[in-house]
Amino acid sequence: MERIILDCDPGHDDAIAILLAAGNPEIELLGITTVAGNNTIENVTTNAQAVCQVAGIDVPIARGASEPLVTPQIVSHDIHGGTGMDGPVLPEITGELDPRHAVDFIIDTVMAEPAGTVTLVPVGPFTNIALAMRKEPRIIERVKGVVVMGGSYTRGNVTPSAEYNIYVDPEAAEAVFRGAWPVTMVGLDLTHQALATQELQDRVRAVGGEVAQFVLDIWGFIGKTYEDVFEFPAPPVHDACCVAYLIDPAVMKTEAAHVAVELHGQWTKGMTVVNFADRPGMHHSTGVAVDLQDHRAQVATELDWDRFADLVAGSIERIAAR
Ligand code: BDR
Ligand code: CA
């Protein structure tokens, strides 16, 4: 059983991450925290509430940072639409938010639960996580780990070298990767293998009902933008990959690496510079003043798509049957 706080910016794939977590018995979803990213903090928070309402998920939702640490916010209208989660018809929100700021929710929860039992899962810009580790540094040794969606070692999706969650708040990302806690980086190299193909969509269609239709509407919209903008055959379900890994680590292969974030490059700002453990000596030529021999992160490389699809479809089936 993995006990997680999902820190997100819904976001179409964030929504699937919420459903995957809430629908799988191996995950205890301690709470959802929101962060400005794909859209304004107001909209992504409403979207998180809407997902939970549609699916009958009763967990605390705490609103977080309204802008990145240093750089101005960059929303993702071109991919996620004007609301951050265009496509499905969203209900009127009836539930209340947790009264705490997301940063305080994260700190309170990690400090209140037994040491080594809570995993943080940031799948938006890492602003809340960086603020929490600075406000209460004891969370760094207290968490079980941090499983992030962000970065890449081969390509970007905002610029040729930078992935969105890192590009939007690179200073926060650098703080998280430098933290003395176990980080698993699930980047584009992995998530671009996690496509919601026609086969997966047909499985969800066969489930029927409101939640299944919600998921199909999500994939309908994001599938169109990924086709138009990136010429993808189907939409990647980036954020759900982190949750899938926590349910079943065999869903992907990972490799030890040191990850640093490029903060200043004219063409490379927001790039994750990944030094795999099996490439000793590369650090000698970089001159970078960090210990590149400290291979603290695990970086995801290869997805078992069949396992992933089973997990996603399984959660939607279980939620629909409730
Ligand atoms: C990431 O950026 C967002 O648009 C998605 O929700 C995902 O977290 C992919 O680069
Ligand atoms: Ca996201």
Image (tube, rainbow, N blue to C red):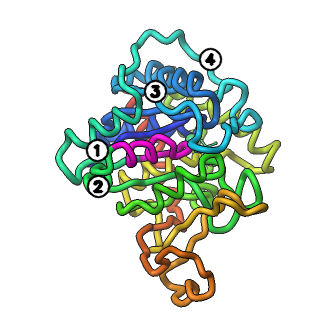
Q: Earlier in the sequence, mark 4 or mark 2?
A: 4
Q: Identify the residue under disc 2.
A: 144
Name the amino acid, label 4. Val
Name the amino acid, label 1. Arg
Real-space Cα distance between discs 4 and 1?
30 Å
Nearest to the eye among marks 4 and 1: give it.
1
Nearest to the eye among marks 4 and 2: give it.
2
Q: Earlier in the sequence, mark 2 or mark 3?
A: 3
Q: Residue at x 53, y 20 (%)?
A: 46
Real-space Cα distance between discs 2 and 1?
9 Å
The one of 135 and 139 positioned closer to us in this rendering: 135
Q: Residue furthest left?
A: 114
Position of residue 123 measured from the top left corner of the image (x, y, whole percent): 51, 45
Q: Is residue 199 visible?
A: no
Q: Do tag 2 and tag 1 residues touch (Cβ < 8 Å)?
A: yes
Q: Do tag 3 and tag 1 residues touch (Cβ < 8 Å)?
A: no
Q: Which mark is residue 3?
A: 1
Q: Earlier in the sequence, mark 2 or mark 1?
A: 1
Question: Which residues are drawn in magenta?
Answer: 121-135
The crowding category of the residue bearing disc 4, from other C-alpha atoms within 10 Å (few below 14, some 14 to 19, many at least 20), is few
Real-space Cα distance between discs 3 and 4?
22 Å
Q: Which mark is residue 106?
A: none
